[in-house]
Amino acid sequence: MKDYYKINEISKLYGIGVDSLRYYEKLGILRPRRDTNGYRLYDLKDMYKLTVIRDLRKLDFSMAQIGEFLEGQSVDNTLSLLREEQSLMEEQIREITRRKGLIQKRIRSLKAAERETAGEIVVKKLPERRCVRIEQYITRDEEMDFVIRKLQRKYEDRIQNLGTQTIGAFFAMDDMERGIANSYESVFFVMEDPEDDAGFVLPEGDYVSLCYRGGYAQNGERVRDLKEYLEREGFTPAGPPFELYRIDNRDTMREEEFLTEIQVLLG
């Protein structure tokens, strides 16, 4: 093993750019010697420091923190750094575990949606669902996407992941009555935490439910199917119908794979 390595050799060995190595030198963290031609030469001590820098940067330690540690390195400082590193790693594990749970939940949801029978009307007993909502008149898919992003930004501290978020929308019923489909008056997110102090609630109760596959232009016809079912069965709606997007453009580009559920609360 050589005692000294040039900057290009160190760059390739550690996968660190030459500019970064020069920056570390500018900060005083690395102090390579120079040969007679002025080339930087890095020794084993520099290589040890680079290993520390690389590992701590992966844990988001700042260069100031790393420099302070290397400058005053001692057993006590090393123990303190290791404990901080351990704490950061535990936080990363918690975050990975949380994200894994979200992914598993979405997988289960998509598999259940794929098994769903489209066109069948059923009555479901559902718990209270706390939501956040934004009221805005929408007549185009592009507007819907914009409002969803707007709602996400407003509540980004309470939305875990838009890809796994349950999204719904209330129909603009005046348009529906005039035969205008795919028209909405508000969009909402169902919050993950049942204790979330949200501003809007879908109450606990019995809901008539109808799932359909394909594009949203058919939702006017599907709402009429639900209304005919309610009249036929003698049910009284306790609220307006709304859609929940079980499979949508977050999951597939194929419109024929979309699965949308229409629900109506019963009185």
Image (cartoon, helix red, strand yellow):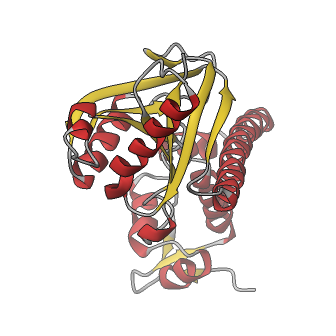
Which picture quadrant has residue 255? bottom left
State the quadrant of the N terminus.
bottom right
The x and y percentages for residue 186 are 31, 31
Query: In the image, is 45 to the left or to the right of 215?
Result: right
The x and y percentages for residue 87 are 73, 35
* Residue at position x 55%, y 22% in the image: 266
Compared to 52, does 74 lie above or below? Answer: above
The x and y percentages for residue 40 are 46, 76
The x and y percentages for residue 124 are 67, 32
Compared to 26, does 175 lie above or below? Answer: above
Q: Is residue 259 visible?
A: no
Q: Nearer the viewer, residue 233 or 223?
A: 233
* Residue at position x 46%, y 67% in the image: 21
* Residue at position x 21%, y 32% in the image: 174
Which picture quadrant has residue 136? top left
Q: Is residue 262 visible?
A: yes
Q: Nearer the viewer, residue 74 or 148?
A: 148
Compared to 91, does 30 lie above or below? Answer: below
Query: In the image, is 156 to the left or to the right of 138?
Result: right
State the quadrant of the C terminus.
top right
